[in-house]
Image (cartoon, rainbow, N blue to C red):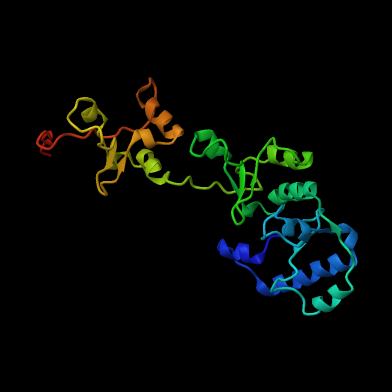
């Protein structure tokens, strides 16, 4: 179960009354069925899991609780004095829980696989990134349960799980270069002929004057631009920049 505050922060609607009722149900289960729950507090104290992590987790369902939560039942402090001992989670439990959380709460995770394939983010970046904590998961890494991996392989990006694709930092203007090609001017020919200085941007936005340099482009952008002149390519055409005074007169309509 994901913290309601995280869902609220993402702009999702949260029924706070229902949240209180749900927390009472989950806490009752944790107290009455301690054998089904894992205690992550020792791992939190050692820094093996992040501070955002729930104190108690039921791996079979994804239910989770925080002892100091605002939503804890008013009777909880008294019940905790005589609470049963929950089994302390081991590091392998933390790894398994993280992978299962990917399926329990797909909206909390960002799917970076397509960005890695495109070269928009480094190959060293995790395949899945938890937006709130920054924790990452790598496909092919140790500890991933096989049933979880089977669900991931069977779930395309548009499938029922729908992990969100993040926007690559700094990629917006490069995406505009392809989605709005008519708003950009291509200075590469002028630079190659010496009519523009080497420091001149390769592409300049005709309205905002924002510049883009190919040597700073993500690998997938450079490859896509390079394919523009190949046979049968359907890449957009960027109007070539001209030196002032060399503009071609437009025909009178």
Identified at 35% across, 39% down, the residue is 177
* Circle count: 0
Is 15 placed left or right of 168 in the picture?
A: right
From the top left corner, tell me how far across and down residue 137 is, in percent: 66, 44
Q: Which quadrant, please, contains the C terminus?
A: top left
Return the x and y of residue 16 as percentages of the image width and height: 66, 73
Asked where in the image residue 3 lies, by quadrant, the reply is: bottom right
Query: Which quadrant holds the N terminus?
Result: bottom right
Q: Residue at x 40, y 31 (%)?
A: 222
**In this rendering, would 31 be left or right of 150?**
right
Name the foreground residue: 215 vs 146: 215
Residue placed furthest toward the top: 231
Identify whether 172 is placed above or below 193.
below
Q: State left or right for residue 183 relative to residue 134.
A: left
- Observer-nearest residue: 164 or 47? 47
**Closest to the observer, 230 or 140:** 140
Q: Residue furthest front?
A: 46
């Amino acid at each position: 179960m994901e913290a309601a505050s995280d869902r609220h922060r993402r702009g999702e609607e949260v029924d706070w009354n229902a949240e209180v009722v749900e927390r009472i149900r989950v806490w009752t289960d944790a107290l009455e069925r301690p054998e089904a729950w894992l205690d992550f507090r020792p791992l939190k104290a050692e820094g093996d899991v992040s501070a955002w992590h729930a104190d108690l987790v039921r791996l079979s369902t994804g239910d989770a609780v925080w002892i100091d939560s605002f939503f804890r039942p008013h009777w909880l402090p008294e019940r905790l004095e005589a609470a049963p001992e929950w089994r302390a989670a081991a590091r392998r439990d933390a790894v398994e829980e993280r992978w299962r959380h990917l399926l329990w709460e797909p909206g909390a995770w960002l799917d970076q696989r397509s960005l890695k394939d495109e070269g928009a983010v480094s190959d060293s970046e995790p395949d899945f990134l938890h937006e709130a904590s920054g924790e990452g998961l790598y496909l092919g890494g140790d500890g991933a349960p096989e049933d979880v991996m089977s669900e991931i392989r069977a779930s395309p990006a548009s499938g029922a799980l729908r992990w969100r694709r993040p926007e690559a930092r700094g990629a917006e203007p490069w995406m505009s270069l392809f989605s709005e090609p008519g708003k950009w001017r291509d200075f590469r020919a002028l630079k190659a002929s010496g009519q523009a200085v080497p420091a001149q941007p390769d592409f300049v936005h005709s309205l905002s004057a924002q510049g883009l340099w190919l040597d700073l482009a993500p690998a997938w952008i450079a490859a896509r631009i390079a394919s523009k002149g190949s046979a049968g390519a359907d890449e957009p055409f960027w109007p070539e920049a001209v030196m002032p005074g060399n503009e071609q007169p437009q025909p009178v309509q």
